[in-house]
Amino acid sequence: MADPTQAPQEMVTVVIDGKEHKFPKGSNLLEACRSVGADVPFFCYHKGLSSPAVCRQCLVDVKGAPKPVPSCYTPVADKMEVTTNSPKILDVRRQMLEFTLLNHPIDCPICDKAGECSLQKQYFDWDAKLARNEGIKVRKAKVVDLGKHIVLDQERCILCTRCIRVCDEVAKQSELTMAYRGSHQVLTTAPGHRLDNPYSLNTVDVCPVGALTSKDFRFARRVWELSTVPSICPGCATGCNIEIHASRGKIHRLVPRENPAVNKFWMCDEGRFEYKAVHENRLLLASQRGKRAPLESALAEAARLLREALAKDPSKVGVVFSALASNEDTHALARLALDGLGVGRCYLGGRPLGWSDKILVSADKNPNTGGVERMVPPPLRTLEGLAADVASGAVTALLVLGNQDLALEPGKLCALVVLSSHQGPLVQAADVALPSATWAESDGTFTNRDGRVQRFHAAFPARGEGMPAWRALALLGSKLSVDLAYASAAEVFADAATRHAFMKDVPWGAQSLPVLLRFGDSRG
Amino acid sequence: MAADELRSEPAARRRVVFGEAEVSDFDETNDLPVESMPLRMGPSHPAMHGTIRIALDVEGEKIKTSDIQIGYLHRCFEKECESATWTQIFPYTDRLNYVSPMLNNVGYALAVEKLLDIEHKIPERAQYIRVVVGEVSRIADHLTCLGASAMELGAFTVFFYLIKAREWLWELLEEISGARLTHSYVRIGGVTADMPEGWAGRLKDVLVKSREAIADADKLLTNNKIFRDRMDGVGIIAKADAAGWGLTGPVARSTGLAYDVRKDHPYLVYDRLDFDVPVGTTGDNFDRYAVRLEEITQSMRMIEQALAKIPVGPILIDDVRIALPTKRETYNTIEAMIAHFKLVMDGIHVPPGEVYSFTEGGNGELGFYLVSDGTGRPWKCRVRPPCFANLAILDKVLPGLFIADVVPTFGMINMIGGECDR
């Protein structure tokens, strides 16, 4: 499609199925047809990739052309007359499907793609004729270990080459290729090479059938049992838009969600495994000095400890923010500690820097550094500084958000209150540890490396006593006579938006409840 | 008919039957005053088939007021349907009027087919089979109603005769569908299986045997003074009320209202069959008994005609978007495998729209109101259960009768909990 940032485009008039439409000159004909409701199917075309026109499924009639043309490969031209639904084109479409199905294995019951398979959908929509041939199918390799995350079933492959183009054009590492010709043609890696680029799992997403499967998701769950909510990857500061696919309180996979301004259609392999931590090593119940305590008494004890520390010497009380926490949690903590309790020593915790590339991956492995830095007034000290401050006695009481990787000298603190979603040494050492929800279990926003505030939605409620940190902080506030009467994340967000310019014009948006994939369209 | 008139009618007729007006007539002013007493029949009561509660206020033996309380068998049928594929609803329909599941199967299938606009594509053989199994089911329904009502009035032998005939019929339905009671035999686009070898002949034989059993019951019952005394002039419903309250089926026809969906709005191949619609004259319990007895005869006529006319051919529509492919094709070709998968997992994609389709069920007009949003599951599935409307008038009929009249009157309405409460 045309680039919207360029000067006004020359418009051309195209007749599609008898109706006149105007499109920018040079637009892709397939996109043009689909944008006006002419349902032209395709396998090999992908909005984020180049068009090779190999699947022949998008053939349409263009007046004057001797044969049907692949619309994915044809730019619109002025006075073009296109037919997408004539009996001839429908027959062409059906015949192409018959070819595609000729050697397709009878795998639906054991295929991970079944239920979100483009081939299934298109057969039902455009063919729906029984086989004319019960002959023997061409046999190919069923289990090809392509790389660290991917398994290939060559029989299921319909040779659309989308995965090859993902490697070429997105990951910029051309590991995949087609070998042999005709019915012997197979997808493979070059001899001695493996599919191990950092974006390899995007090939599974673009695969229209179940040829490429993720080792992680393979045989884990039937797709129609999954429900989806829109979310943001917490793996780094890029903030790739994703969908959480979960079933009964357990995430089974993360897949990218289209956002042209951030991640287009893609996400990195590392980000896809961010969900594992949601289910591992969780802090589910409140505790006092390592022992399980009722939530109410833990809150009261935390309030007592903080009140006493503040009464002794307010300048020796510190608060640790987390670059992994949402804008809402950060705002609630800032309102409680800075505005309400008058704490002045702020520290920023989070994950250490890591590797990066020029495609999607950021070196900052925290999703919300941008948000915390904009919301908390400087100076925002580091965790290394905190260890030294505790050792020197400059800090004697701490309110910590997040499971920070922090080794503190024992016996130096008179109060350590930790609000964390996970178990860890700091939680073990805490006077009071309060459980909080992870990004997957709460509504909120992250501010990515470009200052873009992006919304994520809860896929399911937190287990145990876990609750969004802003809510726990509001409860703690009520015990410390700090009024943080927030009823929802939306209210925290609205309050934050009145105080911070970077959030001002960002809409909170509607609530997305989990939707069963069964009711979605094919994702292929 | 005014309520007072309705109340006085049984007394008037009872005078004629007993011939002793002075003894049996009930004089409200001169009789000893009795204290009103609440009497609650059901929800667990031997005569309350299904589960229903009738809250009566009686003065002595006489019913002053009645309150029919339904809902004890509510199973969220309509809501459940919204999360089942169009095909998965068949087993649910079996459990509407569970005495004649085939008729529910057929009624539901016709509604979906109307929404799919494939009525004209249903193979003729399937249409005849649907008529045959539907009428067999109707006979079974009527036999149950008559047999059970006779039993409740003490005629246990008649119950055995009629239920024996019902069992022969159900054995045939089991043979064709695989299940004695919950058949789930009909499919959108046709039926699941053809008639087994020799089935039609066995059905004809069973009809002959059943006729004998029914004739025996007829001899024992129809002119039996005890039976007639309990039935004649009891529970009278006026023709105008029948129309006004939306009554259908044998209950409406007993009042003289000759409404039969099969005749007035023919579906399937009913317009090619020769049959009569029996009607009553007074609308009392005996008329309802007599109408059902005659309808059994008419249904047998229809079955015999249909079996004579049934053509050879397919029994399911030829469209993989609607009908499951055969097992052989499914296991051996990817096309049929995909179709099978999509039909089972996604369901038939019914175009968006709404439809009301109605057929003659065992108890009257069985209607399905369906709304599709284009997916494989209904957006809404509403049933018009005939006995819901039929039962509603009972509140009006019971006051003025005796407690003992509740049993035959309720029995002749033939409320089926599965259908009424859904």
Image (cartoon, rainbow, N blue to C red):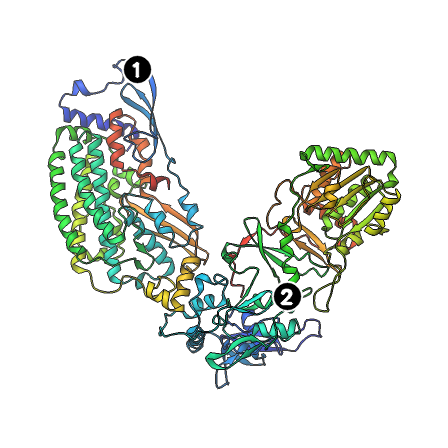
Say whether residue A151 is left or right of residue A493.
left
Residue B278 visible at all: no
Say whether residue B371 is left or right of residue B147.
right
Contact between marks 2 and 1 (CB within 8 A): the answer is no
Amino acid type, mark 2: Trp
| Mark 2 and mark 1: Cα distance apart in space | 85 Å
Q: Where residue B155 sits in the image (x, y, percent)?
A: 17, 31
Relative to A512, say whether A112 is above or below.
below
Q: Which residue corresponds to mark 2?
A: A266
Residue A310 visible at all: yes
Residue drawn at (73%, 33%) of the image: A300
Residue A164, by quadrant, is bottom right
Q: Which residue corresponds to mark 1?
A: B34
Q: Where residue B51 sits in the image (x, y, percent)?
A: 34, 34
Say whether residue A5 is left or right of residue B182.
right
Q: Quadrant of the N terminus of chain A?
A: bottom right
Q: Nearer the viewer, mark 2 or mark 1?
A: 2
Amino acid type, mark 1: Val
Q: Are marks 2 and 1 on the same chain?
A: no
Q: Chain of mark 1?
A: B
Q: Of helix, strand and loop, which one carries label 2?
A: loop
Q: Chain of mark 2?
A: A
